[in-house]
Image: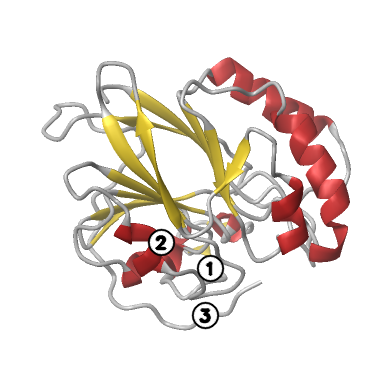
Amino acid sequence: MTGLRVAHVSDLHLRRWSRRWQRLQETLLALDADLVAVTGDFCDRPDAWPRAAEQTRRIFEPVRPRYGLFGVIGNHDPDEFVRSMAGTHVRLLGDEVVTVSAAGGGVLNLAGVAQIDVGHGDMAKCLSAADPAKPTIMLAHYPSVVHFLPPGAVDLLLTGHTHGGQWRFPIVGCLWPQDWIPRPLALGTHNVNGTLLHVSAGVGIAGPLWCRLNCPAEVSVLRLLPAGSAVTPSGYGDRPDPGPPQPSGRS
C-alpha cells in the first residue's frame, strides 16, 4: 500500500449546477487519486434528492479512480437517494466492509457506516467482516464515531458534517462543531486514542448563513504509508485526546 493516494470529499450539499462543481470535477481528475471517499451529505435537503442525484452522477461520471469511488450517507441523504445510486460507480456503503486490493499485493478493509443522525449506524456489524490482520479505513459522516470505536479496530477514520465550523475565527477556531466532539476536532487530522481521525471542511455550504469565513472548501488527499515510515503525512498533528464527547448540537 506504499503511497496509496486517497482523495477525501465531504458535504457537497448539492442544490444547482455551478462553477463550483465543475472545479470539483476538474480537481478530482487532476489529482488522479487511487481511491475517492465521499463522507456524506450529497443532498442539501432530503426532499431535493432527485436534483442531488442527477448532479452527483454528473460530477463523478468521469472520475474513475483505480480502486473505486466509495461513499456513505449523511443526515441530509434519504433512502431514495441511496437507491438512485444503484448501478452507478458511486458505491454507497451501508454498515458494511469491502476489500480493496491494490497493485503490489496490498489489501485493506474499507468500512462504511450509514448515518442519518448522531450515533446512528451499526458499527459492530460494519466491522464484523473486517480482517483484523489488514489495515482498516472507515468512512462515516459524524466525527463523534471515533469515540465509540473498539480500540485498535480502525486505523483511519474519514468524516465530515462539521464543515470545519464553516465560520472560523483566529485563536478560537470554530464556534460550533455541530457534533458531539470538542471544537478542536472539528477540522483536520487528529490522533484520538490511537485512531487517526480526518475531518473534512467539505465542499458545499449550509444555511442559515450561506457563506464560509476563514474556512475554505477543500478536497483532501491522504497518502497512506506503511507503519514505521519516516515520512509524516502532510497536515498531520499528533494532538492529545481532549476527552469524552460533550453534546454540542447538530445541523
Residue 204 visible, this angle: yes
Instruction: Using a 10 Å C-alpha cutoff, classify the residue at mark 1 as few (fewer than 14 neighbours), some (14 to 19) or many (20 or more).
Output: many
Q: Which mark is residue 185?
A: 2
Q: Quadrant of the N terminus?
A: top left
Instruction: Using a 10 Å C-alpha cutoff, classify the residue at mark 2 as few (fewer than 14 neighbours), some (14 to 19) or many (20 or more).
Output: many
Tell me where residue 206 sits by quadrant: bottom right
Helix, strand or loop status at disc 1: loop
* Residue 118 on image: x %, y %: 53, 75
Q: Are marks 1 and 3 in contact (CB under 8 Å)?
A: yes
Q: Are marks 1 and 2 in contact (CB under 8 Å)?
A: yes
Q: Is 147 placed above or below 88 here?
A: below
* Residue 37 on image: x %, y %: 52, 40
Task: Name the residue located 46 percent from the left edge and 26 percent from the top edge.
Answer: 67
Q: Is 106 placed above or below 90 here?
A: above
State the residue position of label 1.
177
Tell me where residue 163 sits by quadrant: bottom right
Q: Which mark is residue 57?
A: none
Q: Amino acid at mark 3?
A: Ser
Residue 188 visible, this angle: no
* Residue 172 on image: x %, y %: 48, 64
Q: Amino acid at mark 1?
A: Pro
Instruction: Using a 10 Å C-alpha cutoff, classify the residue at mark 3 as few (fewer than 14 neighbours), some (14 to 19) or many (20 or more).
Output: few
